[in-house]
Every structure is written in C-alpha cells, then in structure tokens.
Image (cartoon, rainbow, N blue to C red):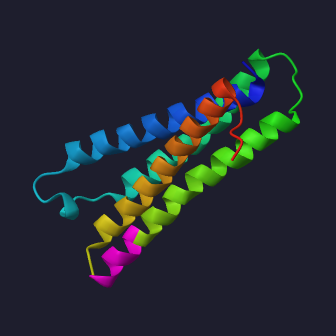
Amino acid sequence: MSLEERFTWVEGIIAVGGYLVYLVLLVGRATGDLAATPYVDLMLWTIGGAIVAGILGGIVVGATTRNQAKDARDREIYRRGEQVGVSLLVVGALGALILAWFEADHFWIANVIYLAFVLSGILAFIAKSVMYRRGLPTW
C-alpha cells in the first residue's frame, strides 16, 4: 500500500468517525426538538478534532511508512477522487440553498452543509480506494 493510499484511508476513517461522534453527541444533547438543540459548539469541536486527527494521522502514517515518492498515478488518483467528491458537495450546497429559500432554521441549513462536506469526503475516499485497487478508469 502506497503512502498516498494510506493517507486516503486516514482521511476516510476520520470523515466517518468525526461525523458519527457529532451525531452521537448531538442526539445525546437533544431534549425534544432537534432543531432547538445547541449544535454550533459540537460542530466546531468535531471539525477541529477532525483537523487535528488528520494532522496526527498524517504524521503517524508518514513516520511509519518508508520513504515513497508521489508518482503520476498517485496524483491522478487524488485529482479524480477529489473531482468525484466535489460533485456531491455541489449537491449539498444546492440543498442548503433551497432550505435558505424556504427560510428553514439555521440548524438544518448548517447540518446539510456539514453533511455535504462529510459525504463529499467519504465519496472521494471510496473513489480513490477503488482506483487504487482497480486502476484508473479510461473515461
């Protein structure tokens, strides 16, 4: 497994784990109406925690993997995987825009945007993982 593929796995695990932590804490904090639950601090802490976990995960992967140069295949897989992931981010932004048009509560708009970022990262992770295992598509 290449260094870049290991970084991809770290990113995927953090995306899923960070969002699950957010959901568990949010639901645990809810007392009734979910939209009335304070969420901003939880969202900021889980996003910040994911950033720190990504940095620490990158350090650990880099320190435990022998030196490997990033080759053209790694760069192409990264580029295509990110393109696939960003497509879902656009859909999430459109969903948030529609919620704003209908004057939905800030809670729902923020959570749709957060979910779109997470799903974008997960989709990019899946696309990159498939490309590492099966090769680059010819499309």
Q: Position of residue 131 (x, y in %)?
A: 66, 33
Q: Position of residue 58 (x, y in %)?
A: 70, 31
Pick the residue in front: 43 or 85. 85
Q: Is residue 139 left or right of residue 69?
A: left
Q: Which residues are magenta?
A: 95-102
On screen, 21 above or below 88? above
Residue at 26% in and 76% down: 104
Residue 52 appears in the rendering: yes
In reply to whether residue 14 is colored magenta, the answer given is no
Q: Which quadrant, please, contains the N terminus?
A: top right
Name the chief secondary structure element in magenta: helix
Q: How many marks?
A: 0
- The answer to whether residue 49 is visible is no
Tell me residue 8's x, y (percent).
64, 33
- In terms of image quadrants, where is residue 103? bottom left
Residue 91: image quadrant is bottom left
* 63 with respect to 51 (left or right): right
Front-lying residue, 116 or 80: 80
Q: Relative to 76, say whether 87 is above or below.
A: below
Q: Residue furthest front?
A: 138
Using residue 9 as the reference point, say whether residue 108 is left or right of it. Answer: left
Give me the residue at 30% from left, 66% from top.
107
Is 3 situated left or right of 50 in this image? right
- Vertical side of 72 occupied by 117: above or below: below
Q: Measured from the top left, where is residue 135 in percent x and y?
A: 70, 30
Give the residue displayed 19% in from the left and 64% down from the top. 36
Q: Image point 22% across, 58% down: which residue?
A: 37
Q: Is residue 97 magenta?
A: yes
Outermost residue on the left side: it is 32
